[in-house]
Every structure is written in C-alpha cells, then in structure tokens.
Image: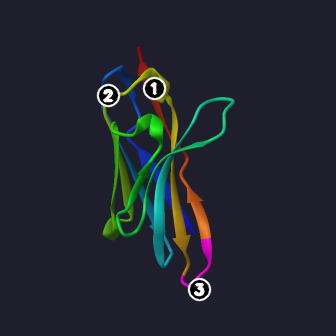
Amino acid sequence: QVQVVESGGDLVHSGGSLRLSCAASGRFSRINDMAWYRQVPGKQRDLVATVTRGGGTNYTDSMKGRVTISRDIGKNTVYLQMNSLKPEDTGVYYCYADVRSYTGRAFDAWGQGTQVTVSS
C-alpha cells in the first residue's frame, strides 16, 4: 500500500511562482521515476516533468525553462518549482511514482491532485 500526497497548489497571478511538493509513504522497496502531470477539465492528463532515480530530468516543451523538478530520494519526495506562471498553466497537478514492492512487483501510484490556478 502506497500513499501519495501532493501539496502547494494555490491561486496566483500571472508571472507568479509556486512550489508543489509530493510525498510517498507506505510499504515498498523503492521508487524509480517520479513525475508531475497536469489535467484540465475535459482533457487528458498531460506530463509536465519527470525525474529518474538518478536525477535525470525531462520537461514538456510548454513549460521548459519555467519549471524545475527535483527529488529527495531519502524522503521519497518530489518537488516542482514553477516560475513565470501563465493562465494556461492552470489545472490540477498530479504526482506520479513508479513503485517497486518488496517482491519486485512494479506498480503505479498517483496522488489526489493539487489545484493550481493562474489568473491573468
């Protein structure tokens, strides 16, 4: 059983900054990749950024240069620093973890999401 909890979503003005946090807890052996996704009503959930266990990162083109993903392996946490926010960045941001159980089984873990609203 793995719990993933996001925090940090808020209402900000265009040009503002936010830092999202996500913590995974429960019984598991390790977490490989972690990521942030964004979803708006009526649309699919889109990838924003990923970070590997080794620290490698990847970003969606629309937010590249404005967001930074980072993680703390020991705390099973991942962060998303977002700067120069735009109204089109509005959405529910979900945290994802690629988890391995003690038996080696792989499974996906998702948080409940945190709302980010950017006003123009």
Q: Is residue 55 left or right of residue 48?
A: left
Q: Is residue 28 left or right of residue 45?
A: left
In the structure shown, which secondary structural element does the residue marked by tag 3 occupy? Answer: loop
> Which mark is drawn over residue 103?
3
> Which mark is drawn over residue 84?
2
At a point 41% along the width and 44% down the height, the residue shown is 7
Can you give x and y, in whole percent of width and height, for residue 119 in the image?
A: 42, 17
Q: CA distance from mark 1 to mark 2?
A: 13 Å
Tell me the kind of residue under disc 1: Thr
Q: Which residue is mark 1?
A: 117
Name the front one of labels 1 and 2.
Answer: 2
Can you give x and y, in whole percent of width and height, for residue 98 in the image?
A: 53, 65
Q: What stretch of residues is rendered in magenta? A: 102-106
Tell me the kind of residue under disc 2: Ser
At a point 46% along the width and 75% down the height, the residue shown is 30
Q: Residue furthest bottom?
A: 103
At a point 46% along the width and 59% down the height, the residue shown is 34
At a point 38% along the width and 56% down the height, the residue shown is 78
Q: Earlier in the sequence, mark 3 or mark 2?
A: 2
Q: Is residue 30 above or below residue 21?
A: below
